[in-house]
Image (cartoon, helix red, strand yellow):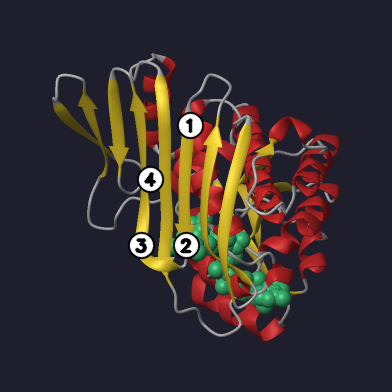
Amino acid sequence: MTTSSTRFGVIGTGRITRRLVADLQSTDGAVVTAIASRSRERARWYGDQYGIDAAVEGYAELLKRDDVDAVYISLPPSMHAEWAIAAANHGKHVLCEKPLTVSVAQTRQVDLACQAAGVRWLDATGWLHHDRTDAFATWLGEGRFGKIGHVSAAVSFYQPFQSGDHRLDASLGGGCILDLGWYAGGLVRFAMGRMPAWVLADEVILDGVSQRLTAMMGFDDGATATISCGYDTATRKWFEVAGTESSLICDDFTRPWADRPARYWIHDAAGTVKSESFDGHQERNMIKRLISDEPLLRYQQQAIDTQAIVEAVQASIKAGGTKFVLSTMTD
Ligand SMILES: NC(=O)C1=CN([C@@H]2O[C@H](COP(=O)(O)OP(=O)(O)OC[C@H]3O[C@@H](n4cnc5c(N)ncnc54)[C@H](OP(=O)(O)O)[C@@H]3O)[C@@H](O)[C@H]2O)C=CC1
Ligand SMILES: O=C1CO[C@H](CO)[C@@H](O)[C@@H]1O
């Protein structure tokens, strides 16, 4: 991308912003030069807290700045596409929080806008960038599991939300399907290396948004997958890959538990259990990747496909919990 430090402008001052600003500031080759909020006071407060020089009122103002090469967007999901596209149109590289957008059509528009502007983009799905995930990808590539027959993933946490949380507002892209289904559906796509042929899903709605999601998926070769997500059970972030030769279990794939190294357990057909653990910092890896010259296509395709899986889940639910065949998807 550049030989000197990449200067990030941050759009939004929410909960996740705190962590990502610290990650940006502690990544070699990245600096944070500006932060924008709807409110000048909040931007100023935030800038003072985190040592960011420019505090800007209004997201559009930040995009006009010459001291910003790339943006980190941490807004509610329904606003991601608008600001990612605007950033691209101003020639800024884009790191956008997950879910990338709220539809496949919007995601394609983001991708096209970035391509047209010649800027790089990634969604901020940190687990994809952990050293552990690189090892998992190698094992998948080597066929270490034999033929994969089933993948399952579960991501949940127990509310309460703070009042006004975007997760409880459908118009802001709230609900657990986009929020947590993004992780579980993305994991299935990553482990299988291809898209499911069909998806069958159901949800529990409370306060106007999905509180719980259960979905089954099928692949052309007969393999299956299940995902379970929700705001009504305590924290889960596990997945299992079951193959003819071995299975792999990971109990913290979205983010390693705070006090433990990232790990996996592999069980082979003879009943041997092997555990492996990994160092590394997924967000710093992600940021380094964005500001490098490394091709990003496989991460971008993963995001586009994840968005399509989430949309297929929504389509199945809309059709009364019947099988949605992905080849009928129009976008
Ligand atoms: N990668 C990860 O591990 C995580 C990712 N996320 C993702 O990050 C994004 C933001 O989540 P989170 O930080 O929890 O969100 P918050 O609700 O805490 O913050 C969102 C920010 O967006 C701005 N905003 C603009 N318009 C609105 C609006 N109408 N309602 C609410 N906020 C608005 C606000 O900043 P201001 O008023 O200053 O303009 C607000 O602080 C989501 O897409 C979420 O899925 C969240 C947590 C973890
Ligand atoms: O991405 C995220 C990380 O996980 C949280 C749950 O623990 C989500 O709500 C959040 O949006």
Q: What is the distance, in whole Å, between disc 2 and disc 3 at their CAs?
A: 9 Å
Circle 4 sits on which residue? 253
Left or right: 226, with 109 as reference point: left
Task: Say which residue appears at 75% left-offset and 48% top-offset.
Answer: 92
Circle 3 sits on which residue? 235
Q: Quadrant of ligand 1?
A: bottom right
Q: Residues within 10 Å of mark 2 (few under 14, many from 20)?
A: many
| Residue 281 placement (x, y as % from top left) | 38, 45
Q: Earlier in the sequence, mark 3 or mark 4?
A: 3
Residue 305's image quarter?
top right
Circle 1 sits on which residue? 224
Q: Is residue 47 visible?
A: no
Q: Nearer the viewer, residue 245 or 266?
A: 245
Q: What is the distance, in whole Å, between disc 2 and disc 4 at their CAs?
A: 16 Å
Which label lies toward us, 4 or 1? 1
Q: Earlier in the sequence, mark 3 or mark 1?
A: 1
What amino acid does circle 2 point to? Answer: Gly
The answer to whether the beta carbon of the residue marked 3 is less than 8 Å from any atom of ligand 2 is: yes
Q: Earlier in the sequence, mark 4 or mark 1?
A: 1
Asked if labels 1 and 3 touch by Cβ distance under 8 angstroms, the answer is: no
Q: Nearer the viewer, residue 2 or 160?
A: 160
| Residue 50 placement (x, y as % from top left) | 51, 71
Q: What is the distance, in whole Å, between disc 4 and disc 1 at their CAs?
A: 20 Å
| Residue 240 placement (x, y as % from top left) | 35, 37
